[in-house]
Image (tube, helix red, strand yellow):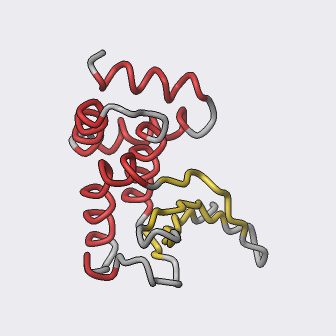
Amino acid sequence: MNLRQFLLYVLPRPDGSYGVDLRQRINSGADPEERPLVRAWDAPFQASLTQVVEALRKSGYRPSDLHRDRREPFELREDQGVRVALTLLALKPLRKTSRMERIAEAIRNMPDEEAYYWFSKAVSTRSARRALRVLLGGE
């Protein structure tokens, strides 16, 4: 069985803001591999911030640990990493803040089984991410 962990890196930007880079670590014996999932900043990151902070808290971190100067990645629990990844993947291409907030809230309220289902689809195809946005975004 592969142990899946999610790593959340902070990406500082020259303007003083920051974004995040979420990766999935898959341990295959002595040679662990990191698979990039999604990078986000600006409006999509801000709309997902509640989910990110909740994931950090449930993974044993304090919300104040999230700041632009952090160099070590956060190791997220699998269930929390799945929700953060799903949220960021769904929000990244959007521009309307109200739609981003509706989608983020819907993902936050999803049962775990549904979140895992959509995560498995969203990481493999763009059409699944689009379908999720249409289903949850209400437009």
Q: Quadrant of the C terminus?
A: top left
Q: Residue at x 31, y 36 (%)?
A: 100
Q: Residue 50 at x, y = what percent? A: 24, 57
The number of numbered discs placed on residues in the rendered structure image is 0
Q: Residue 128 at x, y = what percent? A: 52, 25
Q: Which quadrant of the figure has residue 54?
A: bottom left
Q: Which quadrant of the figure has residue 61?
A: bottom left
Q: Quadrant of the N terminus?
A: bottom right
Q: Nearer the viewer, residue 43 or 22?
A: 43
Q: Residue 125 at x, y = what percent? A: 62, 29
Q: Residue at x 34, y 20 (%)?
A: 135
Q: Is residue 108 above or below residue 126?
A: below
> Of all residues shown, which one is farthest toward the front?
15
Q: Nearer the viewer, residue 18 or 58?
A: 18
Q: Is residue 8 above or below residue 68?
A: above
Q: Residue at x 44, y 67 (%)?
A: 18
Q: Nearer the viewer, residue 56 or 91?
A: 91
> Of all residues shown, which one is farthest toward the top?
139
Side of 137 relative to 25 (left or right): left
Q: Residue at x 43, y 42 (%)?
A: 116
Q: Is residue 12 above or below residue 107?
A: below
Q: Residue 115 at x, y = what percent? A: 37, 40
